[in-house]
Amino acid sequence: MSEITCLILSVVLWVAHVLTQAVTARAEFGDAYLFSPRDKQLLPKGLVCGRAARAFANYTENYVPFAAMALALIATGHTGGMGAAGATIWILARIVYLPVYVMGVVYVRSVLWGAALVGLLMMLVRLATA
């Protein structure tokens, strides 16, 4: 996949994270809380709601360097090759990461996180050596 395709998919995945978190939070906290200004912050007590929130937090932490690398590769015209492969690895690993995290699959989640990191490093190498 190209870097731009992976960037587009990353936004779709961000929406999936938001919706996953919203659905699980609604089940735990109810509509009254979700539509309130949330002046009193409630912490998730249920496993799935907590996992969805942590998965989203992890995604947003890892999204910034991915977006920066993808945009830098696109802006400099150094797309393709190792950069595109790294972006593809990153997005595929992150797509699988969400359900694996929410379901609580141990070890696989960490392997997927590591694979996504490798993808980021591949993008960085492509940008640094272009």
Image (cartoon, helix red, strand yellow):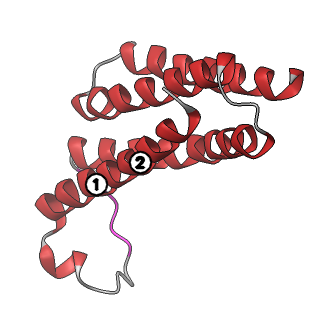
Are dots 1 and 2 in contact, CB under 8 Å?
yes
Residue 114 x, y percent position in the rendering: 55, 18
Q: Main secondary structure of the magenta part?
A: loop
**On residue 113, which mark appears?**
none
Q: Residue placed at 45% from the left, 19% from the top?
A: 112
First in sequence: mark 1 or mark 2?
1
Q: Is residue 95 left or right of residue 76?
A: left
Q: Is residue 43 magenta?
A: yes
Name above or below for residue 73 compared with residue 15.
above
Q: Residue at x 63, y 48 (%)?
A: 64
Q: Pointer 1: residues within 10 angstroms few (<14), some, or many (20+)? A: many
Q: Mark 2 sits on what residue?
A: 56
**Residue designated by label 1:** 21
Q: Does residue 124 appear to the left or right of 9 in the view shown? A: right
Q: Which residues are magenta?
A: 41-45
Quadrant position of residue 104: top left
Amino acid type indicated by mark 1: Gln
Residue extending furthest toward the right:
129
Q: Is residue 10 left or right of residue 128?
A: left
The residue located at (37%, 45%) in the rendering is 13
The C terminus, quarter of image: top right
- Check the image and report above or below for 105 versus 13: above
Q: Is residue 30 above or below residue 110?
A: below
Dot 2 amino acid type: Phe
| Element type where label 2 sits in the image | helix
